[in-house]
Amino acid sequence: MANLDPQAKAYLEMFSQMPLIQSLDAQTVREMFALAPPVEVELASLAKVEDRMIPVADGAEIKVRIYTPEGQGPFPLFVYYHGGGWVIGDLETADPSCRMIAKQTGRVVVSVDYRLSPEYKFPIPVEDSYAALKWVSENAATINGNASNLAVGGDSAGGNLSAVVSLIAKEQNGPDIAAQVLIYPVTALGYDTKSYEEFQQGFGLDRDLMKWFGNYYINNDEESKNKYVAPLLAEDLSNLPPAYVITAENDVLRDEGLAYAGRLKEAGVRVETIIESGLVHGYFTYMAVFPERIKASISRFAKFLSEVDQKVGRV
């Protein structure tokens, strides 16, 4: 039997009342979540929260939400990419967690509303994510941020995008990323690890649901081997930013997150890894169910970011 936190059991019971997402089309799923009654949660108090439109490729624009903590600044920065399998999710789903990140880390958090599949398949979400990273770096002063201390992070598909923009930034010689926070990240589309077998059904993110997401995201099977889809398959992971990798104990993505952390460590990257005991995929953005566990996760990676800063003299 799986080791399940009582809150995770309640969350899975709630999840089991929903229609099978993988039996629906993307737009129907988005509408279903949009029609769900709002859940009141306590929001972290901040100095300012604002939305802006920023330019990406081909004259398009995407929205970002900027969270500024209390204090004088300029603040270190944290670019956040939300989860949702590159198909669902938005600024609202990540909002309570991003507020808490800004408050607990003392960073300006910029949450990125990258364009979603299947309307915008790979590589567009990646290109949007990297364009947003560059925009934050180049416009740091306008949002009271310090471009010389810029971290990236995200959950699930957003963890994937965080790892991928870290690869691209290394290859493109910038922007300089101080650290990456990967929260139960997708690092491959193989669907064949031990954790995929163990938690393939009944733990929120079923294996068939993950395949549903993956099939919407990529254009063909060949792209599943592309390092910007599956960073675990990248040949060279050296000289990447220090990484804090969070996995959930009862999650199909657990083993590929741990495998990516292992490969980073082998490549000489500073890595800290935690398996969140008793938890399931998706906990990090469900503030109504997991407020204390989210707060604890953020406290741990805030400490990691602070230690990274101290090691290189960024204080």
Image (cartoon, rainbow, N blue to C red):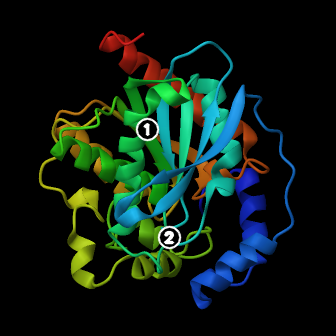
| Disc number for residue 136 | 1
> Tag 1: residue type?
Val
Q: Check the picture and name the quadrant holding the C terminus.
A: top left
Residue 247 visible in rendering = no
Crowd tier of the residue under label 1, counting other residues whose Cα lies within 10 Å: few below 14, some 14–19, many 20 or above: many
| Disc number for residue 116 | 2
The image shows residue 117, relative to residue 256, as above or below, that is below
Question: Helix, strand, or loop for circle 1?
Answer: helix
The answer to which quarter of the image holds residue 238 is top left
Residue at the front extreme, as displayed: 59
Q: CA distance from mark 2 to mark 1?
A: 20 Å
Q: Position of residue 237 (x, y in %)?
A: 18, 45
| Disc number for residue 197 | none
Along the horizontal axis of the image, is 170 left or right of 39?
left
Residue 271 visible in rendering = yes
Q: Check the picture and name the quadrant holding the N terminus.
A: bottom right
Along the horizontal axis of the image, is 240 left or right of 177?
left
Q: For the point 65% across and 14% down, which residue is it?
A: 71
- In depth, the one of 20 and 254 nearer the eye is 20
Question: Helix, strand, or loop for circle 2?
Answer: loop
